[in-house]
Amino acid sequence: MKIMKFGGTSVGKPERMHQVAELITKDAESKIVVLSALSGTTNALVSIGESMAAGDRDNAKQQIEKLEAHYQAFIRELLKTDAALNKAKHIVAEHFEFLTIILKISFSEALSKDILAQGELLSTKLFSVYLEEKGIDHALLPALEFMSIDIHDEPQVAAIKAKLLPILDQHKNKKIFITQGYICRNVRGEVDNLKRGGSDYTASLVAAAVNASVCEIWTDIDGMHNNDPRVVKKTLPIEQLSFEEAAELAYFGAKILHPTCIWPAQQQRVPVKLLNTMQPEAGGTVITQEAGSVGVKAVAAKDGIIAINIKSSRMLLAYGFLRKIFEVFEKYRTPIDMITTSEVAVSVTIDSGTHLKAIVKELEPFGTIEVEDNHTIISVVGNEIAQTQNVLSKLFEALTPVPVRMVSYGGSKHNVSLLLPSSYKTQTLQLLNKGLFGLE
């Protein structure tokens, strides 16, 4: 059995949903198809929730009506027969009736999660109607019956497997299963989600749970490239990455893959393929245990980075000093991306300022605290970079004009990370494209 995940742009137009149906019926292998919400839907639902939270019910109502009109137009192009169209109209009416009803309910965080779930529920149900119209045998698997997160908001493969396999056993005669990405239930049984990009996570978790032959992530890009095509003129597709390399690239800014997608597949050694719905014949990128080659493969950029510098001449060498600093970040559940130390200072970076004030206040007893925002981490990723000749000399030669703030090297054989002001991001990516890959 294989997993095929299609993102919002892959199902965002009726003709693309038609194409997805063709892709999932190209071979006879059993498959679970994971769908995101139609492109733009999640953003619209977030906006509706924000209007409700602000008490602006009139604006929320207008947004709901606009989104419903979009879906009514969508199904008219998606479906041909009156029977299928009437069924789809009923589905759309049901979900937008729910959104209209909640305008009269007091807004809450739990209600916000219910609102956000409507996108994936709609896309999968409408796709199921289309498959039914085309005579394609399948079963619709409600993700809310098997996708769950624990008390720490983390999904557990074992728990998902225990719920999913019995459901699949009920449909032994089926070869195609359709389910929702992103949405799940929390420990209280409430509707919840796997956060942004969570459909990738769903696909990887399901792949691990059923020990799939492959987990295919279909987007509108033909695999992962060596650089950001929005910033540099020429990029190269990457044929093969190891799980470790892919995890580094995803975490440090490569948009094609969600960072959490890697580890469930890696645990069960399920290959992950990044493919292009618009160019299905393209080879894409395969992610496996093996790296395939050595040397630099790609660079990625992660914006919104905050650097925190802690200067303390009397405490840095004291036993337990670093542990106490890390405990502050652990308390506020704020991950550290990079860390460097010297005799009198330690610098760390974080990618969220949600708890910044509280973190700084608790760090102040340890020394002088300096905070710098508007920074970017540029990550150079490959296999055995430390052992590859001239990589570091080429890297720093290329970056002569750039004021690099921090360097992280040696913690991983796959990564060299650089912190620099965000205003130098574009220049840095272009310089590295030329210096490391010989591309203008």
Image (spheres, helix red, strand yellow):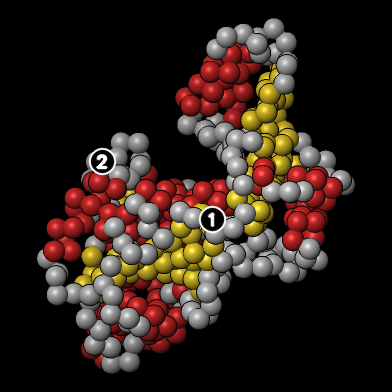
> Which residue is located at x 26 percent, y 41 percent?
187
> Which residue is located at x 64 percent, y 36 percent?
410
- Disc 1 target residue: 291
Say which of 229 and 367 sits in front: 229
Amino acid of disc 2? Val
- Label 1, label 2: how far apart the Cα atoms are: 38 Å
Q: Are marks 1 and 2 in contact (CB under 8 Å)?
A: no
How far from the left and from the top, in percent, is residue 31? 29, 70
Instruction: Give the side of residue 385 with respect to residue 332, left or right.
Output: right
Displayed quadrant of residue 38: bottom left
Number of residues whose C-alpha sits closer than 10 Å to that of mark 2, classed few (under 14), some (14–19) or many (20 or more): few
SS type, badge 1: loop
The circle drawn on residue 69 is: none
Amino acid of disc 1? Ala
How far from the left and from the top, in percent, is residue 155? 33, 45
Vertical arrangement, residue 129 with respect to residue 184, above or below: below
SS type, badge 2: loop
> Which residue is located at x 47 percent, y 31 percent?
333
- Disc 2 target residue: 187
